[in-house]
Image (cartoon, helix red, strand yellow):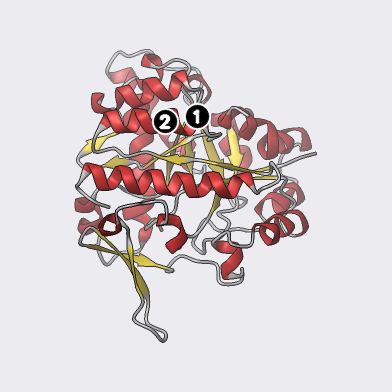
Amino acid sequence: MPTIDADAHVIESEQTWSYISDEKWKPYLIQPGGARPQNWLVDGRVFNRGVNVNRELSEAIREMRDIGGRLKHMTSSISTFRCFIHRCFYDR
Amino acid sequence: MTSKAEIEAAICRSYNQWLIDICRKGEERLRWIAVVPLIDITSAVTEVRFAKANGACGIFMRGLVDDKRLSHSFFFPLYEEAEKSNLPICVHASTGSFDWVQLFEGENGFMRFKVPVLSGFHSIVHDGIPAKFPQLRFGFIEVRAQWVPYMAVEIAKRFERENKVIARNIIRDNHVYVACQTDDDLPYVLKYAGEDNIVIGSDYGHNDTSSEIEALRLLKKKGEVEPRIIDKILYDNAKALYGI
C-alpha cells in the first residue's frame, strides 16, 4: 500500500533564489567560512541557515540537487511513495 | 522576511518555481506546497492561481502573520481562492511575526514556532472560518496531535459559555487535518479527532523535536491502533487533505 509523508522539507540553497531576476532582491548567502554558521541576508534582515538540518542526510539530498538519491532514500529507508514538501525557511 | 511587498512576491515565486522544477523530476512521487506573499493579498491570490496551475497541493501559512491572526478578514480573499482551487491551507510550525519571535528570544523553539500553530487553530475554529469557507480544508503540521483533546474540550467549554453551537467533532466538522507523531498517545487523540483526520509526516531534512525519518514505518510497528486506521493515517487521510 502506498504511503504519504505529509510533512517533508527541502533546504534552501542559492539555487532556490535563482529565478529572481533583480539581483538586489535575492536572499544573499553570508558564508563566514570554517565552522561558523551561515546566514541569509534578506532585505536587511539576517536569518539562520543550516541550524535545523539533519546532517545524516547528504547535502545534495537535503537541497534536492540529488533528486534520484532522495527518491531512492524514500523507498529504501522510509517506505514512502510520495513526499510533500513544506517550506522551511527560518522555521525551527 | 521583508516588509516590501514586491520583494516578498519575488521570493515566493522563485521558491515555488524551484519546487515546481524539482517535482517535475520526481517521477510523480513528489508534490509541493506553495508559499504565497501575504503583505499584498492580491498577490497572494495571484500566487494561489499560479500554484494551482503548476501542480501544488496546498498553501503554506504560519500561525501568526505579522500583526494578524489567521481569522482576520484580510485573509478572506486568499481563503476564497484556495477553496475554489481545492487547495488546503497548511499551517506549519513557525511564526510570521517578528515581534513574537523577539518576545521569546533566548527560549527554545516551543513558543516561537509551535504555539503560533495552536493559536492559528483556535482563531480559525473559534471565529467560524470553516463555516465561511465550507469546502476549504486546513492542515496543522509539525506540532504533534497531542493538543487535540485539550483544544476540543477547551473550545467546547468556551462555546458553551458563549451560547455558540458546538461541533460534534471539532476536527472533522471543521475540515481540519492534524499531523501526529509516533510518540503521541494515538488512541486518546483519535477519540477526539476521529480516524479520518489524522496524518503523519517525517519532517524529512530537519533535525528537531518533530523529526523522525522512520515515522511512517514506526507507526505501523507500534500496533497501538488497528491496522485499518493506520492505513488511513499513512495514506487515505493525507490524500484527502491534499486533494490528490
Question: Residue A29 location, x and y as percent?
Answer: 35, 68
Check disc 2 and report the residue beneath it: B48
Give amino acid for label 2: Val
Question: Residue B45 location, x and y as percent?
Answer: 35, 28
Taking the image as shown, residue A54 lies to the left or right of residue B152, namely: right
Check disc 1 and report the residue beneath it: B52
* Quarter of the figure with the C terminus of chain B: top right
Mark 1, chain letter?
B
Mark 2, chain letter?
B
Give amino acid for label 1: Lys
Question: Residue B55 location, x and y as percent?
Answer: 56, 34
Taking the image as shown, residue B179 lies to the left or right of residue A49, namely: right
Q: Nearer the viewer, residue B53 or B151?
A: B53
Marks 2 and 1 close (CB-CB < 8 Å): yes
| Helix, strand or loop under label 1 | helix
Q: Nearer the viewer, residue B97 or B182?
A: B97
Residue at 26% x, 35% y: name it.
B69
> Is residue B194 in sight in this rendering?
no
Taking the image as shown, residue B77 lies to the left or right of residue B146, namely: left
Q: Nearer the viewer, residue B124 or B145?
A: B124
As drawn, the label of residue B225 is none
Residue at 31% x, 54% y: name it.
B112
Q: Locate residue A12: give its quadrant.
A: bottom left
| Helix, strand or loop under label 2 | helix
Residue at 29% x, 37% y: name it.
B38
Q: Are callouts 2 and 1 both on one chain? A: yes
Q: CA distance from mark 2 to mark 1?
A: 6 Å
> Is residue A79 in sight in this rendering?
yes
Residue at 76% x, 40% y: name it.
A2
Relative to B55, is B161 above or below?
Answer: above
